[in-house]
Amino acid sequence: MQATRIIAVRHGETDWNLGTRLQGHLDIGLNDKGRWQAQRLARALAASEEPIAAVYSSDLQRAWDTARAVAEATHRPLHTATGLRERSFGAFEGMTYAEIETQHPEEALRWRRRDPEWAPPQGESLLALRERVLSTAQAIAAQHQDEQIVLVAHGGVMDMLYRAAAGVDLQAPRTWNLGNAAANRLLWSSEGFSIVGWSDTSHLDDDAVLDETTA
């Protein structure tokens, strides 16, 4: 059975991560620590004995700059995939979680309950996000059977990949890490995704990472 080896990575840290402010499709860049994380990741992947065929990235700057560091270090082609963007949070983008709780308590409750059909105003539901992420990742992986690729994206994207690979329902509470610049290893075949290893941060010297809720 032919399979594609995938290293899925959430972008490096941004100042909005630190401020627990929703980024969504807003194009926020990496901060100094995020750039450092990207370089550490790139160095580790370049030193690996497993060759990388290509690097794919969300077109948002925080992911693209993380991916570009990897592509430059490994001398591999870098491709944009808009389907790897973070979840669209619509009217809530730019707000903190505390502001949403205060100003939109009913919406915040449905969010906390992980209602699969609920979407922020002008935003994207979990069902829509899952369909977009999985169809994009599958299409990319199908082009690289028996090869290894890197996908650089966002916390929400990593969450969907984990749930698909582990068979976890959309409404189930998250018990896995989605840290900035962690290496998450998956396999994809015609039977779907499976997990090889998750949240490897050894290249960051066990540096503390942030939760995906500030993606």
Image (spheres, rainbow, N blue to C red):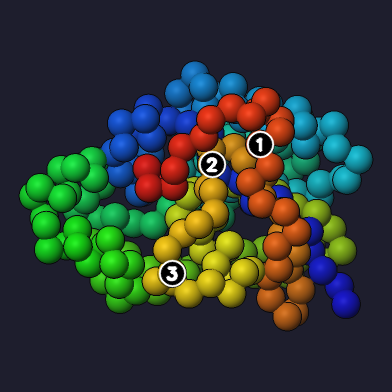
Image check: 124 left or right of 134? Answer: left
Dot 2 corresponds to which residue?
179
Is 196 positioned to the left or the right of 165 in the image?
right
Dot 1 or dot 3, earlier in sequence:
3
Q: Nearer the viewer, mark 1 or mark 3?
A: 3
Q: Quadrant of residue 105?
A: bottom left
Q: Which residue does the image show at 81% across and 33% down from the upper left?
A: 46
Query: Residue placed at 52% from the left, 34% from the top?
Result: 209
Query: CB atoms at circles 2 and 1 under 8 Å apart?
Result: yes
- Amino acid type shown at disc 1: Thr
**Residue 61 rendering spot, x and y as whole percentages:** 47, 37
Which residue is under mark 1? 201
Per the image, label 3 sits on a secondary structure element best described as loop
Question: Which residue is labeled 3 in the image?
Answer: 172
Location of residue 50 by image quarter: top right
**On residue 211, which mark appears?**
none
Above or below, 19 against 132 in this view is: above
N-terminal-most mark, 2 or 3: 3
Residue type at the position of mark 3: Ala
Answer left or right for 74 relative to 209: right
Q: Residue furthest bottom?
A: 191
- The answer to whether the residues at label 1 and label 3 have Cβ atoms under 8 Å apart is no
Q: Which of 158 and 86 is in front in this view?
A: 158
